[in-house]
Amino acid sequence: MGHLPDFIGDLALILITASIATIIFKWLKQPIVLGYIVAGLLAGPYISWLPTVADMGNVSVWAEIGVIFLLFGLGLEFSFKKLIDVGGTASIATLINMGSMIVIGYFIGQLLGWSTMDSIFLGGMLSMSSTTIIIKAFNDMGLQKKKFASIVFGMLIVEDIAAIVMMALLSTVAISQHFEGAELFNSVLKLLFFILIWFVVGIYVIPTLLKKLKRYLNDETLLIVSVGLALGMVLFAVHVGFSPALGAFIMGSILAETIEAKRIEHVVEPLKNLFGAVFFVSVGMMINPRVIIDHIDLILLFTGVVLVGRIVFATLGVMASGQSLKISLNAGFSLAQIGEFSFIIATLGMTLGVISETLYPIIVAVSIITTFTTPYCIQIADPVSAFIEKKIPKKWNKIIIGYAASSYKAVNKQSDWNRLLKSVLTSTAIHFTLSIAVLLLFRNFVTPFIMSYVPDIWGRILSAFATLLVMSPFIQAMVIGKTQTPEFKNLWNHERAINRGAIISLTAVRVVLATVLVLMVLIPLFPRLAVLMVVIALNFITFIIFSQGLKKQSDVMETRFLRNFNEKQQYEEDKSVILPTVANALLNKSIHIEECEVPQLSPSAGKTLRELDFRERTGVNIVAIIRGSKKINIPGPDQIIYPFDRIVVAGSDTEIQAFFQYLEETKSSIDEKSNNEGGHHISVSQYIIDSDSSLLGKTIGNSNIREKTECMIIGIDREGQSETKLVPSFMFESGDILWLAGEKSKLNHFEDNIK
């Protein structure tokens, strides 16, 4: 227990310093993250005239826990469906932006004479924007409803998943100290393999588990279960050679696909905030002010690279995805900073001991500077775009409006072949990967266990049988899956013979893959019987193709997975008025769909849409009104608005902003009126019945106190005894003390009104 005082003392110092910094930076209206970093700098070992931590090792432990919870929280906010929804715009833009900054960072490091690892990590740090800073800036400036903001948020989602992959690859490269293409390719395949396995198995098991345990999951139990699952995945990720952060993120993203996601996010948030604060404070503790002074030239250089490089390449990336010049510039100027993920990558490099100590404080200093410049960059985006538009020749008009808008076409239905190929290839890849996972599991764990008890040939036969038995539903789904879909039947029944030939060829490829999987099980166990194993494999494949039991089992497993995977989306779609896919499609035409609630005292309540005339005042269209469980779609002009109605509106960026500004002004006027009128609070007072009281000899029922005074009796004291069970026949006597409840002004005039 001797280490406990330092351990607790260091944590106390961190949290006290962080709390003071939080309050100060909130007062200054600056990002809290910067406050944490400043707090860490002041409490760190390089500032001797203030109290400092006794053991930096303790801080490192807390910081690593902080990274785990930060990534777990990020995973809860992330969703693989979100990654699909943001579409090509965010993916293309992020690929160009991140790729360019990684290359530039690497070459700058090499030109400065830095080591290869320093240069690689520098490129990774310069490629990551700050989600926290951008969200705060958009909220402060009222830009979160703009179209370019939705593109930026999409790019941040893609950056998050790219950062996770980058961290895993950087860890592999740092440990091996090799940069061979084959090794890196193997690392990428290993990473994708484990991510797919974790995700598929997680979606298959965890939502079902949470549904079965739902009645036992209060907030306390849900917190324990969620954190337990996260830390369990962390341990597993470390065991197979990946970073703890990757495991935490994967488990968060799995839980994000459950209908309990919002609740889990709510109960985990305090832990994420606590340990996240410790992490960012630890970042500040590693800053040596002397290093910053000595390397101010590098700090200014990297700041310039971030401000210029990220603006230019983010803008070009968004333009390459088909957006207009103005939207592209707004997005590019919004991403001109580096933030928390850069710290995490730097911490990873320090933990692995592969980057120099000077790089860490330099990157943190660059982040602080670019954080302060972010709002100003966002503000000058519009003037810059207006200036450039004036200089662009008219023949280059597509650059201004964006080629996606200039060549907008209606999206036709996919062909049967497109849909069939997409579903077959996806199904084959997933089931092939799951089969490989079963094979590796049995080869490394189950088969050695069986052979230890049943040696020689019978042990091999038993191991082969057990492995193929578990793999068989996946192999069966891989070979004949998707053969009952409408697309398959349409193509097979089509008059063109080429369709049947192509389908047979596609099926043959799947049969070959399945045969290879079976041989991968059999030949290592029976290496001298290769020809016989091929015959057995073909017979096994034939058996599972025609086995109705296996088909039923694979169908049940696939149905359960898809139900779990789509349950949250279905739940949200049932609650929403407009499908998310429709809302996303409308963004291509600069149309937003937003919801707002009518305040209780809103002057709009009780009026018809004709009287309110929102379209004339703000330009928006009222798409629907949600009143409790009732949805009024496309309401007519005579529809009345009631308090707590949720109004769904559609409009452009400007119209939506005008609508919310109108509501905010209305709310402000209500609040101001309420403040001027003063609070109508309930007070408690006493009234003593004496010989002159008009209540003497009357009962509660015939005294009409509520009607006359707008007050009520909540108790009566008589001869030292309290009466609270009051009935209408209770008669007042001299000396009774009435306990009255009501507004203060009504209580003050009680005696006058009761007469």
Image: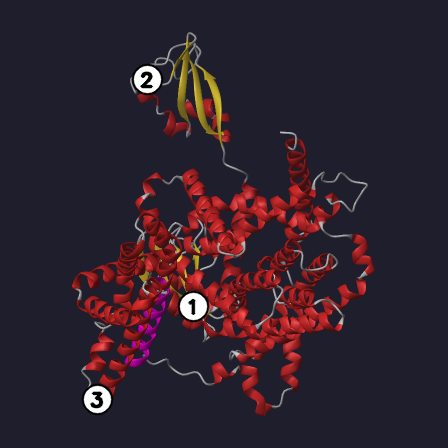
The magenta stretch spans residue 425: yes
- Relative to residue 282, is residue 156 drawn left or right? left
> SS of the residue at dot 2?
loop
> SS of the residue at dot 1?
helix
> SS of the residue at dot 3?
helix
The residue depicted at 50 percent of the width and 84 percent of the height is 403
Is 702 or 44 nearer to us in this picture? 44
Toward the bottom, the furthest residue is 395
Colour setting: secondary structure
Q: How many marks?
A: 3
Residue highlighted by disc 2? 699
The disc, 1 or 3, on the residue closer to the chain's N-terminal end is 1
Residue 581, percent across and down?
38, 68
Quarter of the image with the C terminus in it: top left
Q: Which region shows up in magenta?
A: 416-434
Name the kind of residue labelled 1 in the image: Ile
Residue highlighted by disc 1? 84
